Image (tube, rainbow, N blue to C red):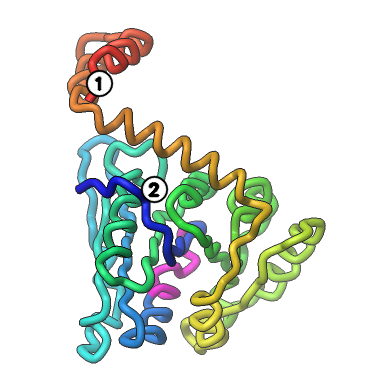
């Protein structure tokens, strides 16, 4: 499948470190927006670098699919990272575009959750929601120069746990010098705090203009990677590198000389 021109629309990435409750957040949003909106979820699943396999089991976490009054307006697909160099495979961009022209009102991309590698979601989503959680410590400051500065909204989930207020305070201070700092919202999928506000806000979320150049950079990088990995000789040359000792320079030269 190849969509020749990318269709702009409501494509929202839900990203953040592992264990902060991204899947529960997505499930809560679906419960509140369906069936009024047709929503597609592309759940990225990590691929083993050794076996090449992926679990692709994200849909089993979505309780909304058990509700027959809502499930008909929801489409869920798990996507393996495969040969992607990061946590967002380049095919996601085409999938999102295809879904938008297939009468879906909103495409939600749930990422793997691997720190600053998630910056790649800027290449395929026009709005980014970063989910944080309690007890993140110095990780928040470490991400300030990366993912957090691309966020259009920051969600501090698990607000029912101790430490969530400190995370909100640390984020507020950390991003305080940013002229158009993203809003910060506390949520809990246990108590329901903030989930109605999140579901309403996500449909009218403004795009931060200050991150435009960084997003364009990610788009260029992903487009270049897509050209490389879609080359029909890519896997064969990769095999020769690992089995025959083909050098990197020689591999790149062959890929350039043997285009699609």
Residue at 47% over, 42% down: 219
x, y percentage for residue 62? Answer: 30, 76
Give the number of the disc on residue 136.
none
Residue 226 on the magenta span: no
x, y percentage for residue 255? Answer: 28, 17
Q: Nearer the viewer, residue 38 or 18?
A: 38
Q: Going by the picture, which residue comes out furthest to the front?
A: 5
- As drawn, 116 above or below 37: above
Q: Is residue 24 left or right of residue 164?
A: left
Residue at 27% over, 9% down: 245
Task: Give the magenta part as a residue range.
Answer: 18-26
Circle 1 or circle 2, nearest the eye: 1
The quarter of the rendered structure image containing the C terminus is: top left
Q: Which residue is mark 1?
A: 259
Q: Nearer the viewer, residue 88 or 52?
A: 88
Quarter of the image holding residue 8?
A: bottom left
Quarter of the image holding residue 61?
A: bottom left
- As drawn, 173 above or below 1: below
Give the number of the disc on residue 88.
2
Q: Judge whether residue 139 can be spotted in this image.
A: no
């Amino acid at each position: 499948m190849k969509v020749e021109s990318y269709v702009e629309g409501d494509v929202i990435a839900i990203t953040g470190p592992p264990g902060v409750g991204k899947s529960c957040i997505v499930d809560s949003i679906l419960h509140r927006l369906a069936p009024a909106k047709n929503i597609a979820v592309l759940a990225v699943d990590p691929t083993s670098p050794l076996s090449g396999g992926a679990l692709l089991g994200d849909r089993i976490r979505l309780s909304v699919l058990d509700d027959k009054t809502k499930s008909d307006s929801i489409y869920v697909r798990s996507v393996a990272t495969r040969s992607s160099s990061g946590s967002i495979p380049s095919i996601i961009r085409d999938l999102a575009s295809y879904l938008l022209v297939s009468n879906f009102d909103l495409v939600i991309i749930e990422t793997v959750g691997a720190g600053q590698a998630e910056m790649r979601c800027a290449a395929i989503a026009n709005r980014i929601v970063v989910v944080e959680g309690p007890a993140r410590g110095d990780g928040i400051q470490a991400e300030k120069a990366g993912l957090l500065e691309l966020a259009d909204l920051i969600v501090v989930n698990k607000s029912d746990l101790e430490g969530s207020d400190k995370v909100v305070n640390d984020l507020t201070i950390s991003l305080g010098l940013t002229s158009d700092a993203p809003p910060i919202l506390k949520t809990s999928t246990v108590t329901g705090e903030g989930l109605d506000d999140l579901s309403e806000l996500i449909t009218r979320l403004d795009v931060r203009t200050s991150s435009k150049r960084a997003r364009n950079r990610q788009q260029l990088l992903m487009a270049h990677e897509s050209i490389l990995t879609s080359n029909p000789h890519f896997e064969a040359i990769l095999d020769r590198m690992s089995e025959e000792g083909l050098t990197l320079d020689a591999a790149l030269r062959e890929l350039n000389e043997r285009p699609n």
